Image: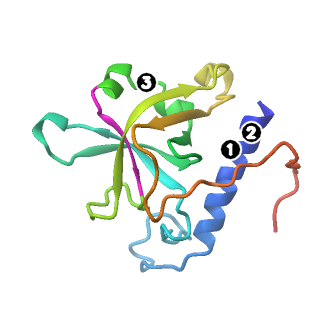
Amino acid sequence: MISSFIIANVIIFQCVQAVRETRRYQSDNDRRIIGGTHAFIKNAPYLASLLLRVDRNSGGNHHTFICGSVIVGSYWSITTASCIEKIAEKLIKAGHLIVRSNTTSWIDLSTTKKDRAVSAFRKHELYKGFECGYDYNIAVVRVETPYTEADETFIDIANEAYQVSTKPHN
């Protein structure tokens, strides 16, 4: 449980740091997150989105956002178990679950975004969902092809020597 907690906190901290290092790009009237800033993929190349294709047979490009994820290896990303707990295995086998990377926008239609079909996922074996307060709420996702694009790098994961602190970072 502690290692899951540490990994989750490192991911959150890295994402917050990436956002803080970017500049504001919208007027206050357009801002959807109060005090938020646009995160550029160059500042957070480990970010990805987990999407569900809703019209694979028609050849269209319609997706539903499921959750964010973070690239941690050549074929692997981390997300929350609560995001994927209700996704049927048959959707994965049919190629409907994808990871979109090389962009900070899940609705990106540019040629720089990269979509990869999910080949497998695994939730933490102690994850029990709401009934246990979402403890162990972590999952790994494997994609069919490796992350190799310019803005796809692995996030640094805390090692065993990482010291957990209850004091806020300044």
Q: Residues within 10 Å of mark 1 (few under 14, many from 20)?
A: many
Say above or below: 40 vs 105.
Answer: below
Q: Which mark is residue 63?
A: none
Specify the amino acid type for callout 1. Answer: Ala
Specify the amino acid type for callout 3. Answer: Lys
- Badge 1 vs badge 2, beta-carbon distance below 8 Å: yes
Say above or below: 170 vs 66.
Answer: below
Where does the image place residue 95, in percent across and percent down from the top left?
29, 32
Where does the image place residue 82, in percent across and percent down from the top left?
53, 31
Residue that appears at 27% across and 64% down: 111
Residue that appears at 40% across and 35% down: 118
Secondary structure found at label 3: loop
Specify the amino acid type for callout 2. Answer: Phe
| Helix, strand or loop for the magenta stretch, by majority | strand
Where does the image place residue 159, in percent across and percent down from the top left?
80, 46
Q: Does the magenta run of residues contain 97?
A: yes
Quadrant for the N terminus, please: top right
Sequence-wise, which precedes: disc 2 or disc 3? 2
Side (left or right) of 94 relative to 10:
left
Alpha carbon distance from label 2 to label 3:
22 Å
Q: Nearer the viewer, residue 152 or 56?
A: 152
Secondary structure found at label 2: helix
Locate residue 91: give its quadrant: top left
In the rendered image, which residue does mark 2 sit on? 5
In the rendered image, which residue does mark 3 sit on? 86
Say above or below: 91 vs 5.
Answer: above
Residue that appears at 71% across and 43% down: 7
Secondary structure found at label 1: helix
Q: Residues within 10 Å of mark 3 (few under 14, many from 20)?
A: few
Residue that appears at 55% across and 31% down: 81
Q: Which mark is residue 8?
A: 1
